[in-house]
Image: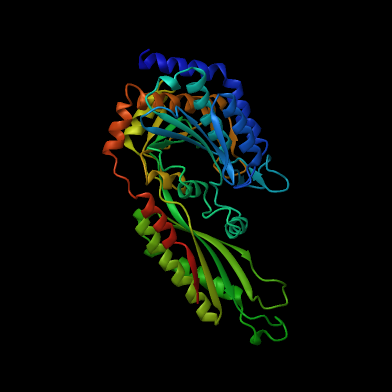
Amino acid sequence: MDKKQLKEKVCQAIDENREKIIHLGESIYKNPELGYKESYATNFISEELKKLGLEVEKNIAVTGCRARGNVEKDGPRVAVLGEMDAVVCKEHNDADPETGAVHACGHNIQVASMLGAAVGLTLSGVLEKLDGKVDFLAVPAEEYVELAYRSKLKEEGKIKYFGGKQELIHKGYFDDVDMAMMMHVLNLEDKKVLIGGKGNGFIGKNVQFIGKESHAGGAPEKGINALNAAMLALNNIHAQRETFKESEKIRVHPILTKGGDIVNVVPADVRMEMYVRGRTIPGIIDANEKVNRSLKAGAMAIGAKVKISEIPGYLPLLNHHGLDTLFKANASEFVKTEEIIEDGDFTGSFDFGDVSHLMPSLHPFIGGIKGDLHTREFKNEDPELCYIVPAKSMAMTIIDLLFDEAKVAKDIIKDFEPKMTKKEYIEFLETVSGVITE
């Protein structure tokens, strides 16, 4: 069969299993789980991959799973990823009443589309006709939430890094992968596909201001008000904003997670969490130094102490023009060319950015949803576009890559220069991980 016929067989298999693919996505939507807690999703996805005749490894990073296709073949290996975790948005109508978790970022759609690509390639028999290998990974913990819980997992030796893809890179699950792809939903209004999107990276921070308690009404002069130190620190950060380069798209957004204990005691223990985001690694580091300076100055002014715990966040999202071009051509079979946007720009962060620094990576955005990500308005309005179009387009792109002795994939790999080796990547994570106390 020629390449066109292979693509037709894959799409036919996906169409025949359309309801199964959508059912998986909707079932995970109804059972939202936060990062490193995705047991329902892990079990559900694992069973569906096993039904395709694939060997599945479960709980690859506390949760998550990996299935490998064409393991006996030579040739490049392509990894197809889908994220399993939910985000916290208690205001959403479908949020879990206890945890506030809801799939208001569409990760349930990602894993369903990943499964859809697996369904198309395996049930059609096309996978075995390709000259390369394909991994299907259901990945945990993309949303950077519940830092205290993840700190506990780290203390127990269950994880080293807070992000799921960071953890999988560290554990070697990408060591023999040559290129990776996944999709993400996004409200594109009257458009349907976006390729070439760029995103910010970030450093995560836990901050504790340490003062001295005292009776707030009777003897405030005997205390050291840690809340005042935090307020000054926030104002110091605001004073830095004009020094951030426009091209770096810096975003600093802290929240107070503890403002004191009781109202009639001078606050001696005040805590906050924050991200420092930017478009490039040097830009993030520069902004982070200014933020740390601001935090220290706030504490110094009051006579308090500050403890800054820095956690490696995610790297900026990069894109690969060759992979984008292949995906665009395949998506054009299902949407009009004028409904495809090129070169999107986002100041949010994706841990797929870490993967994109190591290998050629594809990360298109698909429309079909209403409302912004992480908000109460988020809703899947077009299951065909959200679930089925990306499943077909990714599967067809894999055919392009691995057809005819995988010539296209081999050319991309040959010409690609990674921004970092794995060793350099791990070393960088360690440089932005640590505790500063002053």
- Camera-nearest residue between 216 and 424: 424
Residue 57 makes an appearance in the image: yes
What percent of the width, then of the height, locates residue 430?
44, 60
Q: Is residue 248 left or right of residue 255?
A: left
What percent of the width, then of the height, locates residue 398?
40, 27
Q: Is residue 200 left or right of residue 104?
A: left
135 is higher (above) or lower (below) than 384: below
Q: Quadrant of residue 146?
A: bottom right
Residue at image location 54% in from the left, 74% down from the top: 306
What percent of the width, then of the height, locates residue 154?
57, 57
What percent of the width, then of the height, locates residue 407?
30, 27
321 is higher (above) or lower (below) than 330: below
Residue 250 makes an appearance in the image: no
Residue extending farthest to the front is 72
- Camera-nearest residue between 108 and 342: 108
- Camera-nearest residue between 328 and 34: 34
For the N terminus, the quadrant is top left
Q: Quadrant of residue 400?
A: top left
Q: Quadrant of residue 130?
A: top left
- Camera-nearest residue between 266 and 242: 266
Q: Is residue 183 left or right of residue 361?
A: right
Residue at image location 36% in from the left, 17% down from the top: 3
